[in-house]
């Protein structure tokens, strides 16, 4: 299985234009909790590394200095996402769609070796891991032109991995992953978040 380095730049083409409709944007925001001040953070996350992440990134709180990581962040490899956090504050695993299903050893390593008790799982809107089938031809053409592959090899890889990495819906996938991670690591606090590429802010996802 191919993995990507933390700093690899991947450009995803949005499946729909940003702000496709007012109704779409309204439906999205209805599922999110906006964090503009510390008091907006739900009590269970306040004064925890989860709350600090929200305060740092959304520029509610100035950056502090850290020698050791305080939480694990799982997020998409998309190049449009950049976190505003202190150095050394977090372990970060970047994977398409913030999909940690195939990074379990890395998650366990961060928890065990880093002595971490918190995970923030961050998806983002307009994610390229939604509706992967629509990108099949682009995927094949790109590997032929850029990597020197033949088309049959490129198609074979796409068909092998597409079912593993398709997430269908960004918010629903993050919520399902949070449930899975909580079951896998019952003592770890796991928080679902969404990064809006339009305003570069972090939002908590409502859990219902």
Image (cartoon, rainbow, N blue to C red):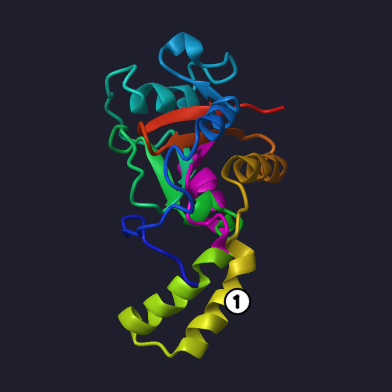
Q: Position of residue 208 (x, y in %)?
A: 72, 27
Q: Mark 1 points at which residue?
A: 159
Q: Depth check: 68 or 193 in front? A: 193
Residue shown at the point (33%, 82%) measured from the top left: 145
Q: Where is residue 105 in the image (x, y as percent from the top left)?
A: 56, 58
Which element is circle 1 on?
Answer: helix
Regarding residue 128, the answer to whether it shows in the image is yes
Q: Tag 1: Cα neighbours inside 10 Å, few (<14), some, or many (≥20)?
A: few
Q: Depth check: 162 or 111 in front? A: 162
> Is residue 55 shown in magenta?
no
Does residue 87 appear left or right of residue 113 in this picture? left
> Is residue 124 shown in magenta?
yes
Image height of 95 relative to 69, above or below: below
Residue shown at the point (53%, 82%) measured from the top left: 155
Q: Where is residue 74 in the image (x, y as percent from the top left)?
A: 49, 45
* Start-end of magenta stretch: 105-132
Does residue 183 appear left or right of residue 29 in this picture? right
Q: Where is residue 156 in the image (x, y as percent from the top left)?
A: 56, 83
Regarding residue 117, the answer to whether it shows in the image is no
Does residue 180 appear left or right of residue 81 in this picture? right
- Quadrant of the rendered image containing residue 24: top right
The mark total stands at 1
């Amino acid at each position: 299985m191919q993995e990507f380095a933390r700093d690899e730049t991947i450009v995803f083409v949005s499946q729909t234009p940003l702000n496709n409709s007012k109704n779409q944007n309204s439906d999205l925001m209805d599922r999110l909790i906006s964090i503009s001040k510390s008091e907006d953070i739900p009590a269970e996350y306040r004064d925890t590394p989860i709350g600090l992440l929200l305060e740092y990134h959304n520029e509610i709180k100035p950056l502090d200095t850290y020698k050791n990581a305080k939480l694990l962040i799982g997020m998409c490899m998309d190049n449009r996402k950049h976190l505003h956090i202190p150095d050394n504050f977090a372990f970060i695993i970047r994977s398409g769609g913030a999909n940690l299903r195939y990074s379990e050893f890395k998650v366990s390593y961060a928890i065990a070796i880093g002595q971490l008790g918190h995970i923030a799982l961050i998806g983002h809107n307009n994610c390229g891991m939604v509706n992967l089938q629509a990108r099949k031809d682009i995927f094949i053409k790109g590997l032929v032109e850029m990597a020197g592959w033949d088309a049959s090899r490129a198609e074979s890889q796409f068909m092998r991995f597409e079912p593993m990495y398709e997430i269908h819906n960004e918010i629903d996938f993050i919520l399902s992953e949070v449930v899975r991670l909580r079951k896998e690591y019952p003592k770890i606090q796991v928080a679902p978040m969404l990064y809006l590429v339009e305003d570069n802010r972090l939002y908590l996802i409502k859990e219902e």
